[in-house]
Amino acid sequence: MTEMGNALYPEYLKVSEADLGKGASVEVKVVDGMDEIAHAVADEMMAVVDAAQAEGCAATMIIPVGPVDQFPILAQMINKQGKGWREVVLINMDEYLDEDDQWVPEGHPLSFRGYMKRKFYDLIDPDLAPLEQNRVFPDPRDLSGIQKLIAARGGLDACFGGIGINGHMAFNEPPEPGELCSLEEFAARPTRNLNLSRETVTINSVTVGGGLAVIPRRAITVGMKEILAARKLRLYCNRLWQSAVVRKVLHDEVGPACPASYIRGHADARLTVAKYVAEPPDIALR
């Protein structure tokens, strides 16, 4: 820890933009802003599908709702290119659950299923769009279903995602205080239903005007096991508050306390951030 005035703060927060990712075995790419992040995600998703099609296969990917701006862009790209995505399998990372551990209704304003339908699938030419059965969300009634699907498809070509304020990938939350979990045990956690952390509920409420009461407290998530088994890991950060967490991911200890830090052990991981995220956090009262 380093002293700054009367405060203590971790060394990783001092990492400069130029040194971001140095020694971390993760490719770090810096782009201008939110629009460039959206296009970067769409371009890479398209590249994964094109590469698989070139080999006579249909890609299988885990995808997020967060970041989100790439989906209308990707729909336009698919329509313009004219290549069918009907056999492409898209596995969404997670979905909110109600009090009975069922998906929140698709009409719920925060439903990821509803968002994907409105902002992606409905925007694609029906002759080109993935078949209904290939638009997959983890099912709280069939927790082993995602692993079975991935195995049947011969593995995951890629996993796309963001990073939460506490370092989560998908909704793989860090262990709660006092909860013991080894490095290996956490990496092996599969698809499951879980409670969302207080940090996640709070930061997610920021996107809905601070409405803490409207954020569901339960969710289903694909596990670290599925994510880390993907052939490619592609993470993106476009929020100003992610400046601190990307430094923790890349320059602090690898372990359950920061789930996204596990990307440092992956053979093909890339983290793309907006320039304002690459800049060190401004730790000061204003």
Image (tube, rainbow, N blue to C red):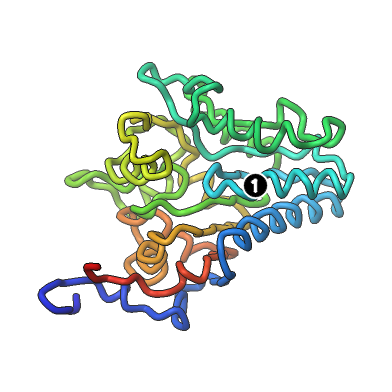
Q: Nearer the viewer, residue 185 or 274?
A: 274
Q: Residue furthest bottom?
A: 18
**Viewer-proximal residue, 85 or 26?**
85
Q: Quadrant of residue 127?
A: top right
Please determine whether, in this image, residue 273 is positioned above or below residue 256.
below
Q: Residue 248's x, y, as percent?
A: 35, 66
> How far across and down, in percent of the image, does residue 229 sit?
56, 50
Along the viewing direction, whichever of 217 and 115 lies nearer the viewer: 115
Pick out the residue farthest to the top: 100
Residue at the extreme right of the image, as rendered: 82
The residue positioned 47% from the left and 22% from the top of the image is 104
Question: Horizontally, is 33 left or right of 135 in the view?
Answer: left
Q: Is residue 157 left or right of residue 111?
A: right
Where does label 1 land, which residue?
156
Three-letter amino acid code at disc 1? Leu
- Vertical placement of residue 286 versus 5, above or below: above
Rendered-image quadrant of the N terminus: bottom left
Quarter-of-image position of residue 242: bottom left
Q: In which quarter of the view is residue 119 placed?
A: top right
Q: Is residue 254 left or right of residue 61?
A: left
